[in-house]
Image (cartoon, rainbow, N blue to C red):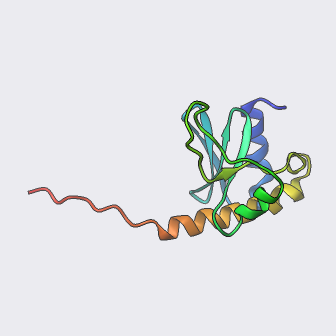
Amino acid sequence: MATVNELVRFLCESLTPLGAITARRMFGGYAVYCDGVVFALVARNILYFKTDDGNRAEYEALGLRPFKPFDDKPTVLPYFPPPDSALDDPDELLLWARPALAAAIRTAAVKKPSRRKAKA
């Protein structure tokens, strides 16, 4: 498989039909953004797309496993890898990326805005 930098570069080029794709280093991997919304991660040279109740079942039906940031802890994040074939076919990659972006937008919409404490 490609190095992480090559994978991130490939994603930034292949996913441009979705919008402005950027990537930033994050905790040893990368967060992939579309128009400022995080919808994918690259960790340990593996691509993971954002999921929620609207698209998670498709990943689970294929037996794909969620992102587990720590091998020694049970914590999993709502990001799943697409099938390997998606990295070989830009059209298939977009078929998995679009619902991931929609999930990220839905998730961002329900997050409550943070409240700042007023200074006295």
Q: Is residue 88 left or right of residue 17?
A: right
Q: Is residue 23 left or right of residue 92?
A: left
The quadrant of the picture occupied by the N terminus is top right
> Which residue is rendered at x = 62% and y = 35% of the image?
29
Residue that sits furthest to the left in the current view: 120
Vertical relation: 57 (above or below) 76? below
Along the line of sight, the residue nearer the viewer: 108 or 37: 108
Where is residue 31? Give x, y as percent: 60, 45
Q: Is residue 120 visible?
A: yes
Q: Quadrant of residue 8?
A: top right
> Which residue is rendered at x = 76% and y = 55% of the image?
15
Q: Is residue 18 visible?
A: no
User: How many callouts does the rendering have?
Assistant: 0
Where is residue 103? Give x, y as percent: 64, 65
Where is residue 58? Give x, y as percent: 78, 62
The quadrant of the picture occupied by the C terminus is bottom left
Q: Quadrant of residue 100?
A: bottom right
Vertical relation: 57 (above or below) 14? below
Q: Is residue 49 left or right of residue 92?
A: left
Q: Quadrant of residue 44?
A: top right
Where is residue 55? Give x, y as percent: 71, 65
Q: Is residue 74 left or right of residue 12?
A: left
